[in-house]
Each structure stands twice: as structure tokens, then as C-alpha cells.
Image (cartoon, rainbow, N blue to C red):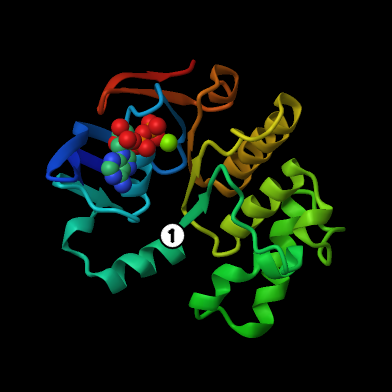
Amino acid sequence: MLISLKNIHKSYTIGSGSYLALKGVNLQIEKSEFVAIMGPSGSGKSTMLHILGCLDTPSEGTYHLNGKNVGTLNDNELSTIRNSQIGFVFQSFNLLPKFSVLDNTMLPFLYSDVPKNERKKRAVESLEKVGLGSKLDNKPNQLSGGQIQRVAIARSLVMKPNIILADEPTGNLDTKTGDEVMDIFSRIHSEEKATIIVITHEPEIAEYTDRTIMLKDGLIVNDTKSA
Ligand SMILES: Nc1ncnc2c1ncn2[C@@H]1O[C@H](COP(=O)(O)OP(=O)(O)O)[C@@H](O)[C@H]1O
Ligand SMILES: [Mg+2]
């Protein structure tokens, strides 16, 4: 089992009170699954993804990643896991405007021990995978929204992560461009055997995946594998 969440609660402090965003989530995801997380706004999707990505910690419950109890790891160990095992793609693309496509794609290497002479090669490979091999020297403002999101996907791939977590990656894109992005995820899923977890509002986007998990009010209310 790659991911195992047991009785995960997450509460946020607001002023003198607190808000329970996750209310006891149990979930198991195997290596190489392609999963969509759906649910209304405010249902806890991003909160859950942040916990899965070790960007945040649960208030209660246990998270085992690759058999390791994440709750027992220190900040250093968590950032090593984030950097070496997990690729993140967000709705807003988070590219640095003054950096070229190639340099943006190489950013994760800053915190890695990947040898200097490997870095460019791996970044170019990732950009070729998303169809941007000819845009290495362009700046983000010379690209379309879909191309920018593909740079973000290439950047999430350079560390060869086991897990790719994407929070509404097509949320700012038109349907056709969103489909292109999902085609890329599908290809990465089948070629690299990566585990991919995508949050989306759109049923058509969820159709690309093999399993749809529905969240409502901080709980999983449905979990369906497609035939
Ligand atoms: N940092 C935070 N502080 C306080 N409340 C938060 C914080 N992050 C999220 N929330 C609240 O938790 C609930 C779930 O948020 P979120 O996980 O972002 O939902 P979703 O991604 O499904 O829209 C929402 O009611 C939101 O307002
Ligand atoms: Mg969200």
C-alpha cells in the first residue's frame, strides 16, 4: 500500500475558535493508481491533498506513506520526502516570470543532490514529455495558459516522483486545453507508472482517471472505481 490514511482529522484555528475541515478520513491508495478527488468547494479537498503531500500535518489520525508513519518524521525528513517522492501541480501555475521555461523546470534541483550535469538533461527530457521541447528559452509570458501548465507539469516530473498531486490543474483552462493537460497526465500515468491524484470540479476531467473519491463536509462519501 502506497498511501494509507486512518481516521484523519484536520482542524484550523480561526480566532478563538476552530474549524474541522476533515472529520475522520480513511483512505488507501495503491502504487500507480490514477485518482480524482471531487466535492463541493470547502469540502476539504485541498486540505487532504496538503496532508497527502506532507505540506501539512493532521490534527488527529495516522498517515502511512510507503509503510512509513509520516507523523513520526521531523521537518527535514518531511522535506526530503516532498522533494524526492512527490511532484506538485497547482491551479495557479507558480512559474517565475523572469526565468526561462528551462530554468523554471530546473527549480526543484536547487534543493537536491542531483549532479549538475544531469540537471539540464532531465529538465529537457521532462519538457519533451509535455511537448515543449522547442520552448526551452521562452519566458512564461510568451506561452499560452495551457503551455504554462505543461511547464508546471514538467517541473513536477524532474525529480522522478512516485506521486503526482495536482490541485485543480485545469481550473484556469478552457475545455480543450484542460483535455490536453489530462492527456499528459494519462500518458505519464501509463508510461511512468506514477501514482497521480487530481482534484477537480469537473466530471469530464475525473473521467480520465480510474477512481473517483467524493468528499463532502470533510468526509469521504463515495469512492468508485471505473470499470
Ligand atoms: N488555513 C486555513 N485556516 C482556516 N480555515 C481553513 C484554512 N484552509 C482551509 N480552511 C477551511 O477549511 C475548509 C476546507 O477547505 P479546503 O480544503 O480548501 O476545501 P476545498 O479545497 O474542497 O475547497 C473550508 O471551509 C476552508 O475555509
Ligand atoms: Mg481547494
Residue furthest front in the image: 15
In x, y percent, where is residue 53? 37, 52
Quadrant containing the N terminus in the rendered view: top left
Q: Amino acid at mark 1?
A: Gln
Picture residue at 75% right of the left edge, 57% below the top: 140
Answer with the quarter of the image where residue 215 lies: top left
Give me the residue at 27% from left, 69% from top.
75
Question: In the rendered view, does 214 fall on the left or right side of 170?
Answer: left
Count of all numbered marks drawn on residues in the image: 1
Whole-percent x and y of residue 160?
55, 60
Q: Residues within 10 Å of mark 1 (few under 14, many from 20)?
A: some
Eyeballing the image, is 147 above or below 216? below
Return the residue nearer the eye: 98 or 133. Answer: 98
Quick check: which quadrant has ligand 2? Answer: top left
Q: Secondary structure at mark 1?
A: helix
Above or below residue 90? Residue 157 is: below
Question: Residue farthest to the right?
Answer: 134
Q: Position of residue 87 (x, y in %)?
A: 50, 55
Asked whether residue 202 appears in the rendered view, the answer is yes
- State the residue lying farthest toward the bottom: 116
**Disc 1 designates what residue?**
85
| Picture coordinates of residue 94, whole percent (x, y) | 59, 55
Q: Is residue 36 above or below residue 15?
A: above
Q: Is mark 1 within 8 Å of ligand 1?
A: no
**The image quarter in which residue 37 lies:** top left
> Left or right of 201: which side holds 82?
left
Q: Is residue 1 visible?
A: no
Query: In the image shown, does 71 or 94 lie closer to the viewer?
Result: 94
Q: Residue at x 57, y 56 (%)?
A: 156
Left or right side of 42 for 8: left
